[in-house]
Image (spheres, rainbow, N blue to C red):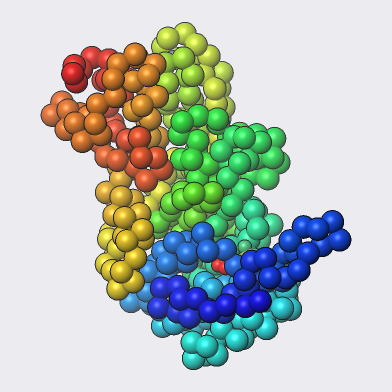
Amino acid sequence: MWKKIVEGKTRLLIPEKGKFGRTKTGRLRKPPVFYNPRMELNRSVCCAVVKALQEKEEIFFLDLLAGSGAKGIRVAKEAACKVHLNDANEEACELIKKNAELNNVNVTISNKDANLFLQENRSFNFIDIDPFGTPVPFLDNAVMTSSGYLGITATDAAPLCGVYPRACLRKYGARPLRSEFCHEVGLRILLGYAARTCAKYSKGMQCLLSHSTEHYFRAYIKLLEGKKKADAALEELGYVYYCKNCLKHEYEKGSIASKKCKCRSKYEVAGPLWRGKIKDDDFCREVLQKSEYLGDKKLAKLLEIVAKELENPFYHDVHKICKKLKIEAPSMEKIIEKIEEAGYTASRTHFSPTSLKTNAELPVFLLGTKFA
Ligand SMILES: C[S@@+](CC[C@H](N)C(=O)[O-])C[C@H]1O[C@@H](n2cnc3c(N)ncnc32)[C@H](O)[C@@H]1O
Ligand SMILES: [Zn+2]
């Protein structure tokens, strides 16, 4: 029922799917402890991030919703960091203990409801929130009790990307947008929500690194103390306006307005969302350096593209624009070269392989340029 695997430099005992019998209706019973192999990259990035932070200050890492302990144990072993793991599931805690022994790491473990645990324990300077779905129920207590860093995962990509707009409004108090750049909108809605949560407790935030991968979003946030920092973070909130007709998008500070695009179509609006930086370039380079020891190609590829990505919100889907303009899509290299020749900047984006970020008005630019 249990098997040994290796993730990064860590050995893990995990539940084997399909080995836990069947329910009365004949369905395969879920394993008693959660482990998702598709989250390996999430855990690898986290190890590299903590390793980079450890160089600057001593980190006490809390794996708040630890499951099998895969993340916390890897951080303890691979970033050589002090770690506490918590999970409400008793069987998860038993497995965490075995995984700690398997790797010879000295960690502490608790079996408590996450919010209760946070209220009673305030000594961590990195809190990792890796829930089923939305991190919203844990953010208030995490922000309230910590003065360091937060690692936040959201696997509720469908509401954040606009498939279920009402769910997004309920959870995040923000309007999402079904569009070709919905992943960046989703990530920024999550960050905007984090900034609003921080502000409630007179804290601001800096986003050190963030990514959108497969079915989830992940953000690394540095909490900043004080009302001024909180006000400054709120200044970074705004809205994105999107014209479905000509695929143009604009973003703006402040409150929602009924606006029209130059083509006279009515804009669709998403937000409030984070307009500020979604990474710190120096920090990204440090994490990339730290990740090299893992020899994980996927990890290096993600970090390289994130590090080189322009900050300009939001990305443009070249294929979608070209289809609309009825022109053949040029290669990404060629279009980036042309944009740069014209004196603008452009980069690929980790959000989508067919998209790029630029300070040029891309639909207009593509229309005016002969790529054939
Ligand atoms: C997505 S899993 C964590 C996965 C893990 N971080 C990893 O990388 O493998 C979420 C975990 O949160 C635990 N959990 C859910 N609600 C909780 C709560 N209110 N308090 C404590 N643990 C909770 C579940 O038992 C589950 O193990
Ligand atoms: Zn328009």
The image quadrant that residue 346 belongs to is top left
Q: Left or right? Give the position of 6 relative to 89.
A: left
Task: Give the x, y percent position of residue 226.
Answer: 51, 60
In the depicted structure, whether residue 272 falls above or below residue 304: above
Task: Give the x, y percent position of residue 218.
Answer: 49, 55
Which residue shows up at 34% across the image and 13% down it?
Answer: 326
Q: Can see residue 121?
A: no
User: The N terminus lies in which quarter of the figure?
Assistant: bottom right
Which residue shows up at 48% across the image and 56% down it?
Answer: 219
Foreground residue among 213 and 56 = 213
Name the quarter showing ligand 1: bottom right
User: The C terminus lies in which quarter of the figure?
Assistant: top left
Which residue shows up at 46% across the image and 14% down it?
Answer: 245
The image quadrant that residue 352 belongs to is top left
The residue sitting at the left extreme is 341
In the depicted structure, whether residue 5 falls above or below residue 162: below
Task: Give the x, y percent position of residue 338.
Answer: 17, 28
